[in-house]
Protein backbone atom coordinates (compact mmCIF):
# COMPACT_ATOMS: atom_id res chain seq x y z
CA UNK A 1 0.00 0.00 0.00
CA UNK A 2 2.79 2.35 0.97
CA UNK A 3 4.38 1.67 -2.41
CA UNK A 4 1.10 2.39 -4.24
CA UNK A 5 0.64 5.67 -2.40
CA UNK A 6 4.18 6.63 -3.39
CA UNK A 7 3.61 5.89 -7.08
CA UNK A 8 0.24 7.71 -7.02
CA UNK A 9 2.04 10.72 -5.64
CA UNK A 10 4.64 10.39 -8.42
CA UNK A 11 1.93 10.23 -11.11
CA UNK A 12 0.25 13.34 -9.70
CA UNK A 13 3.54 15.24 -9.65
CA UNK A 14 4.39 14.09 -13.18
CA UNK A 15 0.96 15.18 -14.43
CA UNK A 16 1.37 18.61 -12.87
CA UNK A 17 4.82 18.96 -14.46
CA UNK A 18 3.54 17.90 -17.91
CA UNK A 19 0.56 20.27 -17.75
CA UNK A 20 2.94 23.01 -16.67
CA UNK A 21 5.20 22.34 -19.65
CA UNK A 22 2.28 22.31 -22.09
CA UNK A 23 1.06 25.64 -20.67
CA UNK A 24 4.56 27.10 -21.04
CA UNK A 25 4.72 26.01 -24.70
CA UNK A 26 1.31 27.51 -25.44
CA UNK A 27 2.44 30.83 -23.93
CA UNK A 28 5.67 30.75 -25.92
CA UNK A 29 3.78 29.90 -29.09
CA UNK A 30 1.33 32.75 -28.59
CA UNK A 31 4.19 35.15 -28.01
CA UNK A 32 5.97 34.19 -31.20
CA UNK A 33 2.71 34.41 -33.16
CA UNK A 34 1.86 37.87 -31.89
CA UNK A 35 5.43 38.92 -32.69
CA UNK A 36 4.94 37.94 -36.31
CA UNK A 37 1.58 39.70 -36.50
CA UNK A 38 3.08 42.91 -35.18
CA UNK A 39 5.71 42.92 -37.89
CA UNK A 40 3.16 42.32 -40.62
CA UNK A 41 0.62 44.90 -39.47
CA UNK A 42 3.20 47.67 -39.12
CA UNK A 43 4.32 47.14 -42.73
CA UNK A 44 7.34 44.83 -42.76
CA UNK A 45 8.70 46.44 -45.94
CA UNK A 46 8.52 50.07 -44.81
CA UNK A 47 11.96 51.73 -44.72
CA UNK A 48 13.41 52.57 -41.30
CA UNK A 49 12.88 56.32 -40.87
CA UNK A 50 14.63 56.95 -37.55
CA UNK A 51 17.02 59.88 -37.79
CA UNK A 52 15.54 60.98 -41.13
CA UNK A 53 13.78 64.28 -41.89
CA UNK A 54 10.08 63.67 -41.27
CA UNK A 55 7.21 66.14 -41.52
CA UNK A 56 3.74 65.61 -40.06
CA UNK A 57 2.33 63.93 -36.96
CA UNK A 58 4.68 61.24 -35.64
CA UNK A 59 1.69 59.00 -34.83
CA UNK A 60 -0.06 59.54 -38.19
CA UNK A 61 -1.65 56.30 -39.47
CA UNK A 62 0.11 56.50 -42.82
CA UNK A 63 3.83 56.75 -43.49
CA UNK A 64 5.11 58.03 -46.83
CA UNK A 65 8.75 57.88 -47.82
CA UNK A 66 10.19 59.70 -50.80
CA UNK A 67 13.47 58.50 -52.25
CA UNK A 68 14.69 61.57 -54.12
CA UNK A 69 17.76 63.01 -55.80
CA UNK A 70 18.29 66.79 -56.01
CA UNK A 71 19.93 66.26 -59.41
CA UNK A 72 16.92 64.42 -60.86
CA UNK A 73 14.61 66.55 -63.07
CA UNK A 74 11.56 64.35 -62.34
CA UNK A 75 12.14 64.84 -58.61
CA UNK A 76 12.13 68.62 -59.16
CA UNK A 77 8.73 68.34 -60.84
CA UNK A 78 7.41 66.04 -58.09
CA UNK A 79 8.64 68.40 -55.37
CA UNK A 80 7.05 71.35 -57.15
CA UNK A 81 3.69 69.79 -58.11
CA UNK A 82 2.83 66.61 -56.21
CA UNK A 83 4.34 67.26 -52.79
CA UNK A 84 2.28 70.42 -52.09
CA UNK A 85 -0.90 68.42 -52.82
CA UNK A 86 0.10 65.57 -50.51
CA UNK A 87 1.02 68.11 -47.84
CA UNK A 88 -2.23 70.02 -48.10
CA UNK A 89 -4.52 66.99 -48.40
CA UNK A 90 -2.90 64.52 -46.02
CA UNK A 91 0.12 65.78 -44.04
CA UNK A 92 -1.51 68.95 -42.69
CA UNK A 93 -4.62 66.94 -41.75
CA UNK A 94 -2.60 64.55 -39.56
CA UNK A 95 -3.21 61.49 -41.73
CA UNK A 96 0.29 61.19 -43.12
CA UNK A 97 3.84 61.71 -42.01
CA UNK A 98 6.36 62.16 -44.79
CA UNK A 99 10.06 61.29 -44.83
CA UNK A 100 12.77 62.22 -47.33
CA UNK A 101 15.66 59.87 -48.11
CA UNK A 102 18.54 60.72 -50.45
CA UNK A 103 19.34 58.78 -53.59
CA UNK A 104 22.79 59.08 -55.18
CA UNK A 105 22.06 58.20 -58.82
CA UNK A 106 23.96 61.26 -60.10
CA UNK A 107 27.26 60.45 -58.40
CA UNK A 108 29.34 63.13 -56.72
CA UNK A 109 26.81 65.89 -57.35
CA UNK A 110 24.11 63.85 -55.61
CA UNK A 111 26.47 63.23 -52.70
CA UNK A 112 27.21 66.94 -52.40
CA UNK A 113 23.52 67.89 -52.46
CA UNK A 114 22.65 65.11 -50.00
CA UNK A 115 25.35 66.13 -47.54
CA UNK A 116 23.98 69.69 -47.74
CA UNK A 117 20.48 68.46 -46.86
CA UNK A 118 21.86 66.38 -43.99
CA UNK A 119 23.91 69.34 -42.70
CA UNK A 120 20.88 71.64 -42.69
CA UNK A 121 18.81 68.93 -41.00
CA UNK A 122 21.50 68.58 -38.32
CA UNK A 123 21.33 72.30 -37.49
CA UNK A 124 17.59 72.74 -37.76
CA UNK A 125 15.37 69.73 -38.45
CA UNK A 126 12.33 71.89 -39.31
CA UNK A 127 14.28 74.10 -41.72
CA UNK A 128 15.28 71.06 -43.76
CA UNK A 129 11.99 71.24 -45.67
CA UNK A 130 12.47 74.86 -46.72
CA UNK A 131 16.01 74.13 -47.86
CA UNK A 132 14.99 70.96 -49.70
CA UNK A 133 12.25 72.82 -51.58
CA UNK A 134 14.63 75.67 -52.44
CA UNK A 135 17.34 73.31 -53.68
CA UNK A 136 14.87 71.66 -56.06
CA UNK A 137 13.78 75.10 -57.23
CA UNK A 138 17.43 75.97 -57.87
CA UNK A 139 17.78 73.04 -60.26
CA UNK A 140 17.69 74.58 -63.79
CA UNK A 141 14.59 73.86 -65.91
CA UNK A 142 16.81 72.98 -68.86
CA UNK A 143 19.51 70.37 -68.36
CA UNK A 144 22.69 72.17 -67.40
CA UNK A 145 25.87 70.33 -66.45
CA UNK A 146 27.72 71.54 -63.36
CA UNK A 147 25.01 73.83 -61.93
CA UNK A 148 25.44 72.38 -58.48
CA UNK A 149 28.43 73.82 -56.65
CA UNK A 150 29.14 74.30 -52.98
CA UNK A 151 28.81 78.07 -53.49
CA UNK A 152 25.37 77.57 -55.02
CA UNK A 153 24.33 75.32 -52.12
CA UNK A 154 25.42 77.86 -49.51
CA UNK A 155 23.59 80.61 -51.42
CA UNK A 156 20.40 78.52 -51.46
CA UNK A 157 20.79 77.76 -47.75
CA UNK A 158 21.23 81.44 -46.85
CA UNK A 159 18.15 82.43 -48.84
CA UNK A 160 15.85 79.63 -47.67
CA UNK A 161 17.05 79.36 -44.05
CA UNK A 162 18.19 82.85 -42.96
CA UNK A 163 19.13 81.59 -39.47
CA UNK A 164 21.60 79.04 -40.83
CA UNK A 165 25.21 79.10 -39.70
CA UNK A 166 26.85 78.61 -43.10
CA UNK A 167 30.34 78.17 -41.70
CA UNK A 168 29.15 75.28 -39.56
CA UNK A 169 27.14 73.91 -42.47
CA UNK A 170 30.25 74.00 -44.64
CA UNK A 171 32.25 72.09 -42.03
CA UNK A 172 29.47 69.60 -41.35
CA UNK A 173 29.11 68.75 -45.03
CA UNK A 174 32.65 67.34 -45.06
CA UNK A 175 32.35 65.62 -41.69
CA UNK A 176 32.38 61.89 -41.19
CA UNK A 177 29.08 62.10 -39.31
CA UNK A 178 27.27 63.58 -42.31
CA UNK A 179 28.97 61.18 -44.74
CA UNK A 180 27.64 58.35 -42.58
CA UNK A 181 24.11 59.77 -42.83
CA UNK A 182 24.42 59.91 -46.61
CA UNK A 183 25.73 56.33 -46.58
CA UNK A 184 22.78 55.26 -44.42
CA UNK A 185 20.39 56.61 -47.08
CA UNK A 186 22.32 54.85 -49.83
CA UNK A 187 21.98 51.57 -47.91
CA UNK A 188 18.21 52.07 -47.62
CA UNK A 189 18.05 52.66 -51.38
CA UNK A 190 19.76 49.31 -51.97
CA UNK A 191 17.82 47.51 -49.26
CA UNK A 192 14.48 48.55 -50.76
CA UNK A 193 15.44 48.02 -54.39
CA UNK A 194 14.89 51.65 -55.39
CA UNK A 195 15.69 51.94 -59.10
CA UNK A 196 14.00 55.13 -60.20
CA UNK A 197 13.65 58.60 -58.73
CA UNK A 198 11.42 59.75 -57.33
CA UNK A 199 10.28 56.54 -55.66
CA UNK A 200 7.33 57.02 -53.33
CA UNK A 201 6.43 54.37 -50.75
CA UNK A 202 3.15 54.43 -48.84
CA UNK A 203 3.30 52.24 -45.70
CA UNK A 204 6.05 50.29 -47.43
CA UNK A 205 4.18 49.86 -50.71
CA UNK A 206 5.76 51.38 -53.80
CA UNK A 207 3.63 53.78 -55.88
CA UNK A 208 3.75 52.66 -59.53
CA UNK A 209 3.40 56.12 -61.05
CA UNK A 210 4.30 58.96 -58.65
CA UNK A 211 2.90 61.45 -61.18
CA UNK A 212 -0.55 59.92 -60.99
CA UNK A 213 -2.05 61.76 -58.03
CA UNK A 214 -5.14 59.55 -58.18
CA UNK A 215 -3.00 56.48 -57.51
CA UNK A 216 -1.32 58.25 -54.61
CA UNK A 217 -4.56 59.42 -53.02
CA UNK A 218 -6.25 56.02 -53.54
CA UNK A 219 -3.36 54.24 -51.82
CA UNK A 220 -3.36 56.76 -48.96
CA UNK A 221 -7.14 56.45 -48.44
CA UNK A 222 -6.81 52.67 -48.44
CA UNK A 223 -4.02 52.83 -45.87
CA UNK A 224 -6.10 55.15 -43.67
CA UNK A 225 -9.04 52.72 -43.89
CA UNK A 226 -6.82 49.76 -42.98
CA UNK A 227 -5.54 51.65 -39.95
CA UNK A 228 -9.15 52.04 -38.73
CA UNK A 229 -9.91 48.32 -38.95
CA1 LIG B 1 19.01 60.97 -44.62
Image (spheres, helix red, strand yellow):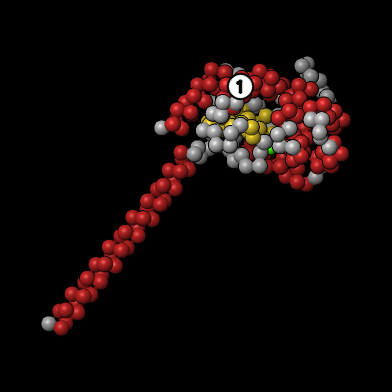
Q: In the picture provided, is 133 more to the left or to the right than 45?
A: right
User: For mark 1, what is the residue?
Assistant: 88
Q: In the picture provided, is 210 more to the left or to the right than 140?
A: left
Image x and y of residue 11, in percent: 21, 72
Residue 33 against residue 56 in the figure, above or below: below
Residue 10 against residue 32 in the figure, above or below: below
The residue located at (79%, 27%) in the rendering is 160
Total number of numbered discs in the rendering = 1
Image x and y of residue 119, in percent: 77, 38
The residue located at (66%, 42%) in the rendering is 51
Q: Identify the secondary structure beneath mark 1.
A: helix
Q: Residues within 10 Å of mark 1 (few under 14, many from 20)?
A: few
Q: Residue furthest top?
A: 142
Q: In the picture provided, is 142 more to the left or to the right than 98?
A: right
Image x and y of residue 171, in percent: 84, 42
- In this view, the residue in front, 83 or 183, is 83
The residue located at (25%, 70%) in the rendering is 14
- In this view, the residue in front, 96 or 12, is 96
Image quadrant containing the N terminus: bottom left
Figure quadrant of residue 172: top right
Residue 30 against residue 169 in the figure, above or below: below
Ligand 1 is within 8 Å of the C-beta of the residue at disc 1: no
Image x and y of residue 195, in percent: 63, 30
Amino acid sequence: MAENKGSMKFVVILTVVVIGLIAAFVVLDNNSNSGENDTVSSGGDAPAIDGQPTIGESDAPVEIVEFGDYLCPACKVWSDQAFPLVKQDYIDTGDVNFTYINVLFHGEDSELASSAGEAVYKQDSEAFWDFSKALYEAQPEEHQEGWLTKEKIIEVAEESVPSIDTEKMNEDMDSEEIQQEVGKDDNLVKEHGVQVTPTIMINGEMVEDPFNYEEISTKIEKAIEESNE
